[in-house]
Amino acid sequence: MKEYSEAIAFLGQWGRFQQMVFFLLCASIMPNGSGTFNLVFVADIPPHHCFVPDVNLTEDWLKAAIPVQVVNGRQELSRCSRYRLDVVRNLSAQGYVPGRDVNLTDLEQESCVDGWTYSTDIYQSTIVSEFDLVCSEEWKQPFTITVFNVGVILGSFFAGVLSDRFGRKPVLFATMAVQTVFGFIQAFSTSWIMFLIFLLIGGLGQMSNYLAALLLGAEILTSNVRVLYSSLGTNFGFAFGYMMLALFAYFLRDWKSLLLGLSLPTLVYIPLWWLIPESPRWLLSQGRVDEAEAIVRKAAKWNKVQAPQLIFEEYNENKTKTKPKKRSNMLDLVRTCNLRTITFVVCLVWLVNTIGYIALSYNTSQLHGDPFISCFLSALVELPAYVSTFLVLRYLPRKVCVIGFSLLAAASLYLIPLMPQSLPILNVVLELLGKYAFTTGAVLMFVYSSELYPTVLRNTASGTGSTVARMGNLTGPLLLKLSVFMKYLPHITLGSMTVVSAIAAVVLPETFGRPLPDTIQQMPTIKMLKCPCVNSEETKGHEDSPL
């Protein structure tokens, strides 16, 4: 039986049909870039302090009612306390002048019982100012990001299952609809809990839409065009959407307006239902040969080529009748010493790169005095990262690149605390360099992991590694909260984790220039470790099994 790519070779690789699919799917991914990181602005914490009613207070006492604290070497108004209002009113009524007649440090303080006053210099409002997610409720801000990422992880898992069951195209548009509808509804939340519920459901459609588009394009396109789409097209679409977020946020400073502004334009994707086809590969796997042929014939008309009378003539005649192979599972990834070590190191390196990518992406509001410029730069730096990935995968060894980019990320993070505060631009450059290195490293691990494992374990290994890596989506935002103990503690911690992962990656075998393994016996082995079970009876015992 002909391979699918051979059966449709008459279409060519880059006709009008392939161009339409390529660019429309890339465009469908753009909302993922803006949706994944819109919480950078929607959930940002504006400067704030206790609200002080101006009743019966002189101008001097109104200004002095909030204690001054030193934070990271700078004086700031206390965010969560004020001097007891009844005492301040009494002193104001008696004509005392703060700082001259009264030592303010001797006054008793109280919490913000009347609420807070939020700065509107940058934002008109965020969910933090809307629902008072500060002080004793400050834990709700990183928890909000965590809930969103839980939705992303669950959506990624179920999208894969559903796309195998119902098809690539229905899942792509269903997840786009979930993303759009619940992004719109979030703007009408009247409480933090309501916002959280809508955010969780909206998260289900975020990266699942990306994965559905990636899979659909990879199955429709062939050869070099498929590689270009999977490595650069989808990633560029995501990065451009990420950059558009900064533009929308600059003009829409209110969190509700921003969510509406990001959601409503996605309605233009509705006509894509009639332009983007179902995956012919998936239709063939379901035995729906006539539907697959109809799509390919339509593509032939777009490309102005003549289709053969029977495109998949041998498909039904040569269906394999051999005994189905045993399905692999996660336990097979730890069956031998070699597999256990490779799996552990791959998951560790992938996880650390993802934590770094997410943490530095969500830290963009603190990167520069202008959070909109910071967001744009953080998105812009991903473009050379994706190009670098494409080039190093073609010309350089995998292990050297993974270790090199990990050390580059660690070095940039370690240097940030050493930079003089008088030159903040150096911190910006170093953090962007770290973001570049983590982005490149995370994408490299997708390819490296697929080359390390045999065919019978490849999907299981990639799925497991990707799932572990997505735990970084949960960990990254929480890591940033270590700054309450020391300003640069998140950078030092993340840098140390990255060094550990780089050292661990030394044991991984090289795969550059080698054919993909089909069986466990063909897997590259870890030579520097004396693994007694490699090539031993433990491995030989599986020679007759599907694994």
Image (cartoon, helix red, strand yellow):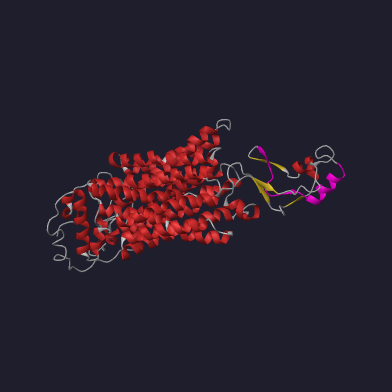
Frontmost residue, 274 versus 309 = 274
Tell which residue pokes out farthest to the right in this image. Answer: 94
Which of the image's four quarters has the N terminus? Answer: bottom left
Indicate yes or no whether the magenta region holds residue 89: yes
Which of the image's four quarters has the C terminus? Answer: bottom left
Frontmost residue, 457 versus 63 = 63
The residue sitting at 46% across, 41% down in the picture is 378
- Seen in the picture, residue 496 relative to 330 is either above or below; the reply is above
Q: Residue 225 location, x and y as percent?
A: 25, 46
- Seen in the picture, residue 422 relative to 212 is either above or below; the reply is above
Frontmost residue, 535 versus 56 = 56
Magenta region: which residues? 74-95
Tell which residue pokes out farthest to the left in this image. Answer: 309
Residue 492 visible in rendering: no
The residue sitting at 31% across, 59% down in the picture is 168
- Seen in the picture, residue 444 relative to 294 is either above or below; the reply is above
Indicate yes or no whether the magenta region holds residue 206: no
Left or right? Give the position of 242 relative to 517.
right
**Disc count in the image?**
0
Q: Residue 223 location, x and y as percent?
A: 23, 48
Residue 475 visible in rendering: yes
Q: Residue 486 location, x and y as percent?
A: 60, 43
Q: Quadrant of residue 440?
A: top left
Q: Residue 394 location, x and y as percent?
A: 28, 41
The residue sitting at 14% across, 52% down in the picture is 306
Tell which residue pokes out farthest to the top in this image. Answer: 422
